[in-house]
Amino acid sequence: MEAPILISDEYFGEVEVFYKKITKSFVINPLTRKITVKYQGCNEKGFCYPLINKELIINNGEILINKGT
């Protein structure tokens, strides 16, 4: 897993930045039915893309992706 780099952004202040792929592992509680994932990308010139929300729907052991907004 890549470690974040701390930068000072003129609009967001001190932020952690990842430049490559990141992964996250966790144990899912058997009662969990939905996981919401949010992420945003920015280029080095300061332009940030809109926030992306995705829902992972867990149904009978299958994970379905609801792209959301």
Image: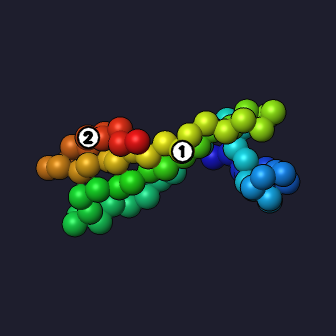
Q: What residue appears at the point 70 percent right and 44 percent down from the top-left corner?
A: 18
**Foreground: 5 or 14?**
14
Q: Quadrant of residue 19?
A: top right
Mark 2: which secondary structure? strand
Please, what is the three-letter code of the amino acid marked with disc 1? Leu
Which mark is nearer the camera, 1 or 2?
1
Q: Position of residue 50 (x, y in %)?
A: 56, 40
Mark 1: which secondary structure? loop
Q: Quadrant of residue 14?
A: bottom right
Q: Position of residue 54 (x, y in %)?
A: 39, 44
Q: Which residue appears farthest toward the front when viewing the image?
A: 11
**Foreground: 47 or 1?**
47
**Foreground: 62 or 10?**
10
Residue that badge 1 annotates? 51
Task: State the CA–CA distance, disc 1 to disc 2.
Answer: 20 Å
Q: What residue appears at the point 73 percent right and 47 percent down from the top-left corner?
A: 17
Task: Let me know if residue 68 appears in the view.
Answer: yes
Residue 67 got which mark?
none
Count of marks overlaid on the render: 2
Badge 1 or badge 2: first in the primary sequence: 1
Q: How is the image coloured?
A: rainbow
Q: What residue appears at the point 77 percent right and 38 percent down from the top-left corner?
A: 46
Q: What residue appears at the point 23 percent right and 50 percent down from the top-left corner?
A: 58
Q: Position of residue 9 (x, y in %)?
A: 82, 51
Q: Residues within 10 Å of mark 1 (few under 14, many from 20)?
A: few
